[in-house]
Image (tube, rainbow, N blue to C red):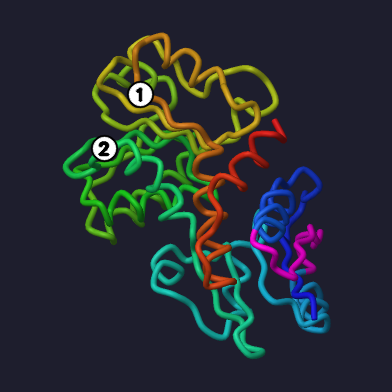
Amino acid sequence: MTKTYAVIGDPIDHSLSPAIHNAAFAFLGLDCTYIAYRIPKGELSEGIESLKLINIAGFNVTIPHKIEMMKFLDDMDEDCKTIGATNTVNNENGKFKGYNTDMNGFLEPIKQRNQSCKDSNVLLIGAGGAARAIVAAFAKEKAHKITVANRTREKAEELVKFANNLGLESDHTDLVNAGNTTGNYKFIVNATSVGMKNNTSPISTRMINKDCTVYDLVYMPVDTELLEQSKKQGATIIYGWEMLLAQAMRSFEIWTKRKAPYEAMKLTLLGRF
């Protein structure tokens, strides 16, 4: 009996998850398939019912359902509870258990570079969906302080409060000031979609230096303007596809209880660019 997995969200047609997971299933010879299933905002409840009807084995959750999906879970892991969002659901004997692989998926590329987040100052650009997982990640790794730079002040203030509740010192600033003070931070993380459609950077890069690590969650294009310019300034850079791959591997391992085939998944992912 073929097991079916999916990614749910809207828009979904650009998702790279089906290619990555199907390559992994094929590589390990597993009788599983992975599909993209569009569920528009406001239709999550009906969408979940259809997934139950086809006895879905597990699924990933992306924009705009990561927070609302929490209401439909029978159980959840600690990361889910901390972040208040889920991106991976496993069907465990008819019960939906939620996980959040964003936090560890985000940290994995940093650890691969043998970098420590402990006592570091962090500039986080954006306060949307992925931002909470990133704040939780830095809190877990005992960073010193996180500064949130965002277009709207309300969202930044919410995130600062969230960081404070996790015991992390935090404040917020505007995008112009953030660009003028980048040299003060060890980690600069872009969690906005700026750079995806048009070749612009969310902040000025002229103060970025060799002591900075610049991490852009945008994975298409692979080399965003922010990363290109930061590389020229001598900074260490981390690509968005690295987090995408790391969190996909964790989802795969939760579902199959097997080690994810890193090379097969990586080659498939990079082949898509």
Q: Is the C-beta separation of discs 1 and 2 under 8 Å?
A: yes
- The residue singled out by tag 1 in the image is 236
Amino acid marked by disc 1: Thr
Q: Which residues are magenta?
A: 28-43
Residue 10 left/right relative to 252: right
Q: Which mark is residue 63?
A: none
Residue at the spot x=19%, y=44% of the render?
118
Residue 150 appears at what percent x and percent y?
47, 35
* Magenta stretch encompasses residue 4: no
Figure check: 120 above or below 81: above
- Residue situated in front as seen by the camera: 122 or 7: 7
Residue 220 appears at what percent x and percent y?
65, 31
Q: Quadrant of residue 82?
A: bottom left
Instruction: Choose the circle earlier in sequence order: 1 or 2.
Output: 2
Amino acid marked by disc 2: Gln
Residue 202 left/right relative to 53: left
Calculate the distance from the C-alpha at mark 1 to the C-alpha at mark 2. Answer: 10 Å
Figure check: 195 above or below 144: above
Residue at the spot x=69%, y=34% of the render?
271
Residue 2 left/right relative to 224: right
